[in-house]
Image (cartoon, helix red, strand yellow):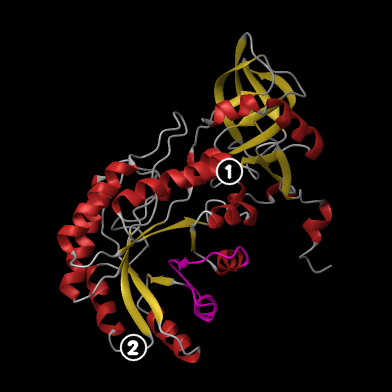
Amino acid sequence: MQLTVYIKQYENILLDIAEEYGTPVYVYFAEILLNNFNKIKTIAKKYYRKILIAYAYKANSNIHLCKLLHREGAGAEVVSSGELFLALKASASKIVFDGVSKSVSEIEYAVRNRVWLINIENLGELKYIDYFSEKNNIVQKVGIRFNPGIEVSTHKHIATGGKLNKFGLDSKNFIRAVSISKKMKNIDLCAVHFHLGSQIFDTESYIKALERVLSLAEEAGLNIRIIDIGGGFGYSYETGETMNLDNLFAQISRALKDSLGEEPTVVLEPGRAIVASAGILLTKVNYIKEVYGKKWVLVDAGMNDFIRPALYGAKHKITVLGKNGPTEKYSIGGPVCESADVFAEDMELPRVAPGDVLAVHDVGAYSYSMSSNYNTRPRPPEVLVDRKEIKLIRRRENFEDLLRLMIT
């Protein structure tokens, strides 16, 4: 069921949520979240006998959402000690620790907590992993993130597998990493990893990257038991369509069978594809005004709450709860003192009035997780709708919270 249908079905409940918890407020639908995850899992199981879907915590790290996914069998993909802390608290069964600049303390924390896999992006990580693994009397599974030097069609801020990107190791250093690790008794180098970026819709880039890393692993004499193809599976904010995962997974399965004798464990790291369409942002209209002929709807949510339009030029569908009928063209802006604090330009909406509640669609991913206190604005609450059950899963920050970490 599409998000638009849910919003219509739960319209009265959403208005009640806005009344009870105030606006702005993030609202998530558990059913959509789990449907999205299980759809990916069902497709993946058609092609892979050994599979781990490691949910990307960076997309949305609210522990309540993460626990729902872990109960369905999801692992966790984390990129910081903070995300790792949450994954441990959420009882993730298998944790993949990625990250382009892991600190020594983060590596120690990961090894001490026996994460399932650490994917390195720097040669220097190996000595720390080996040292802390020996200290903890374990052998740590390790993968190498390969930068395949492939440009993909996406926003430049979220492309991560090109030659000018900071991520991963190039071919020369990949081979060096294999050689170094063979001399380390507390490292089990068993995995390769690549991640091309986010919002990718073509399968060809994945296959090219896979072929390159498999060829390189063979050249380096690396026995691959785990292949981590990352995430970045595209989700269209305009149509709700996703990348053709059936086609992608089938092609990857064929490539693995052609290249490897033993079937590896395949790791996927989706985030947006699971959680984006599960969330909306409710925001109340403060004022309507006209500036040089341009009609503005000014709302109480700002770019500090929801930065995607300002940062990426992202366009999200917006609806007015409880209203139909004649439309007008509006631009929608927030209260932050930045001209970039605009959610939509010249959008057709039913006639809007102060006090109306707008729903910004598809904000489950990279929305609250990228929010801030800019302009000294407390961050909004988060609410989970699980069929008819309404649960507050993060309270609204208050003014005292803004002072809590300051030394006064």
Q: Residues within 10 Å of mark 1 (few under 14, many from 20)?
A: many
Residue type (three-letter) at the residue carrying disc 1 = Ile
Which segment did they paint magenta?
Answer: 89-115
Mark nearer the N terminus (2 vs 1): 2
Residue 138, x across and y down, in percent: 45, 86
Q: Is residue 161 left or right of residue 314?
A: left
Against 289, residue 221 (above or below) is below
Residue type (three-letter) at the residue carrying disc 2 = Met
**Residue 160 appears in the picture as rendered:** yes
Against 137, residue 34 (above or below) is above
Instruction: Tell me, yes or no, whether the highlighted magenta stretch contains residue 61.
Output: no
Identified at 69% across, 51% down, the residue is 373
Q: Which mark is residue 307?
A: 1
Residue 299, picture quadrant = top right
Against 294, residue 366 (above or below) is below
Determine the secondary structure under disc 1: loop
Among all residues in the image, which is located at the extreme top?
A: 326
Residue 227, x across and y down, in percent: 31, 63
